[in-house]
Image (tube, grey):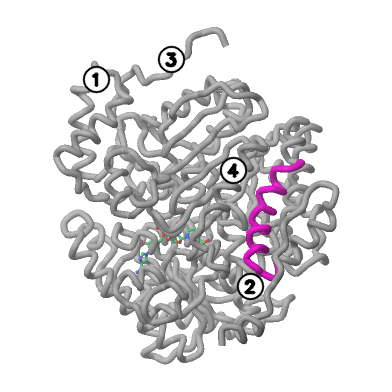
Amino acid sequence: MTERLTVELTELPEPGDFEPGIRRAPDRGCTLTRREIKIALANALRYVPTNHHATVAPEFLEELRTRGRIYGYRYRPHGRLTGRPIDSYTGRITEAKAMQVMIENNLDFDVALYPYELVTYGESGQVCQNWMQYLLIKRYLEIMDDTQTLVVSSGHPLGLFPSRPEAPRAIITNGLMVGMFDTPEDFHRLAALGCVNYGQMTAGGWMYIGPQGIVHGTYITLLNAGRLYLGVPEDGNLAGHTFITSGLGGMSGAQPKALEISGGAGIVAEVDASRIETRHSQGWVSKVTDDLETSVRWMLDAAAAGEALSIAYHGNIVDLLEYLDTEDIAVDLYSDQTSCHVPYDGGYCPAGVSFDAMRDLLTTDREGLKTLVDASLARHYRVLKRLTDKGAHFWDYGNAFLRAVYDAGVPEITANGVDPSEGFVWPSYVEDIMGPMCFDYGYGPFRWVCLSGESEDLHATDRAAMACIDPTRRGQDRDNWQWIHDAETNALVVGTQARILYADAEGRTEIARRFNRMVRDGEIGPVMMGRDHHDTGGTDSPYRETANIYDGSSTVADMSHQCWAGNAARGMTMAVLSNGGGVGTGKAVNGGFGLVLDGSERVDRILDSALEWDAMGGVARRAWARNENAIETVDGWNRANADRGHVTVPRVADDALLEDLLD
Ligand SMILES: NC(=O)c1ccc[n+]([C@@H]2O[C@H](COP(=O)([O-])OP(=O)(O)OC[C@H]3O[C@@H](n4cnc5c(N)ncnc54)[C@H](O)[C@@H]3O)[C@@H](O)[C@H]2O)c1
């Protein structure tokens, strides 16, 4: 490149309007001191030419005071952003155009939770912190070539650095904080200052594919919960069984769809009418009512007839649970997906308070709201305890519900009645289901986006992926084969032409190789391949992904860092590492990747080691933690790959020997 790179925002765009009906993030609450507000303003003004500071600074101050953050709304492109076909983007290389597709899909009105505030999902998971960053990232992507790498720190594009074609095109981190300061309070202050971004998992990693991303995992969880707790046969489904949960948001909105795919009947409580409307109009939930009795009758009738049915109850989950308890109505399975990773920031609506009133309290009386949330979580715990004592099963669905109840002042929710060091009275779904049945074998949420935007490409990849799965190999393969077989019929696409499919290391590699060949042969356009961070190796999260690690290391974050470094070293297009995904700041470190399949032999070479590392690194750590299924998987890998590598296998101590010794 010969011309001098000048990537800056010289223009002063006209402020745009906010389209009615598009959800807006709540005021996050500005608690900064005068000195800090000055720093926050100076920080945001770094993106703006000095001749515009007098115009823009008062707007930034207003945003900080009324929204708790500086989003730089003026810099948002007007109208709707959407992940368009890759050829319609400006750029010198396919990878850079592919990243633009992914970013804009993450900000699409149909996909994103609060698109104006750059929030993709999970109440607070953002693509980047503000619209100036968005514009700069886009400009860098428009000019970058394959000798450069874009470095993004919490949404801030630090720059385009010289690298080489085999290196990643983007290295992205979100909100990684120094241990002692890694607390939600510090994070809140730093976010207002413009120093950190909460990336959730795939929001700040630019790999969100709409609620479909979570439907497959939810379907697997529900089916396996049926097998584990209700004795559903291996080849059976949830017909005749009932399930109650909450949340119809970004991720939680997958629950009713997954429930119907798995054949069960159930109710999802949701306090926000607009989210019910979204999921209902998308066909992700079948019936809607705000009447408790009606919702329960519909559910019981459907279950009695063996029919699959999902119902949205417009109201608080606590009211629904207390009704079932008072009326003594038996339900088989319970869970919860309110945004308990941020219960005091609008993620959990207390019983007795409407959604709108809760949002008002966020602005007018945060302390008062906290008191109400704590009281409601305690009530929530007590009613669930009564229901599970009567025989129902409850699991924490990765939203830090158990931890939030404990933090609300209810130590009885812990296994030892004092603190969470020995776990909780109910399992997390990873402890009982996803960990032993999927992650320990290397099965995880592999996904892809057909960048041409053509539905035919998606159908072709669905068929190709199905041909790579042997449904007789393992129960998991049968479930995954069924999933991909039915995927088109289940109409799962929201936003770009994307698909999720759980697969293990071998399966992922085989499918990706086949797709790359199809791109090379001109059968399909380029494909962005990646995964959710909610996987076997990418995430250290003691209340979730690593909840079934029992060797004491579940709070150690080596695995996610090694996974990320290994992915970068092997040349994934994007390598991402973030703080807190799913469960909240300081409670997890998670990493993900994106790899553009452009049909080249260079990508074949990356595929030869990268997907295998990405999954097997996690299985290796799980095996070292003495997880039986992971040891079995590692043994198999060691045998099959004796000439390529070796994973260290643990010697398992005899429990009786240790007990005797200690007695
Ligand atoms: N299980 C998983 O694999 C997984 C994956 C991603 C995220 N999560 C976690 O699940 C949670 C939900 O994620 P999301 O993306 O759907 O978030 P979200 O904020 O978009 O949705 C949560 C929904 O819960 C509703 N809600 C809050 N309190 C309620 C109450 N008391 N009664 C009824 N409804 C209530 C909210 O109105 C909102 O629509 C988050 O904590 C997230 O981190 C879990």
Question: Is residue 615 in the magenta section?
Answer: yes
Give the class, few, some or many, for how many residues have Cα within 10 Å of label 4's Cα (few <14, many ≥20).
many
Residue 292 x, y percent position in the rendering = 38, 79
Give the class, few, some or many, for how many residues have Cα within 10 Å of label 1's Cα (few <14, many ≥20).
few
* Any part of residue 261 in sight: no
Q: Give the label on residue 6, or none.
A: 3
Report the front residue among 88 and 336.
336
Which quadrant would the N terminus be assigned to in this image?
A: top right
Mark 2: which amino acid? Leu
In screen coordinates, is 527 left or right of 109?
Answer: right
**Distance of label 2 from label 1 (alpha carbons):** 57 Å
Q: Specify the quadrant of the image occupied by residue 593.
A: top right
Q: Which residue is mark 2?
A: 223
Q: Which residue is mark 4?
A: 593
The reply to whether discs 2 and 1 touch (Cβ–Cβ < 8 Å) is no
**Distance of label 1 from label 4 (alpha carbons):** 37 Å
Which numbered mark, 3 or 1, is in the foreground of this view?
3
Q: Secondary structure at mark 3?
A: loop
Mark 1: which amino acid? His
Q: Give the label on residue 266, or none.
A: none
Does the beta carbon at disc 2 come under 8 Å from ligand 1?
A: no
Q: Which residues are drawn in magenta? A: 608-629
Residue drawn where x is 64% and y is 37% of the image: 569
Residue 265 x, y percent position in the rendering = 55, 76
Q: Which residue is mark 1?
A: 52
Q: Secondary structure at mark 4?
A: strand
Mark 3: which amino acid? Thr
**Distance of label 3 from label 2 (alpha carbons):** 54 Å
The reply to whether discs 3 and 2 touch (Cβ–Cβ < 8 Å) is no
**Distance of label 2 from label 4 (alpha carbons):** 28 Å
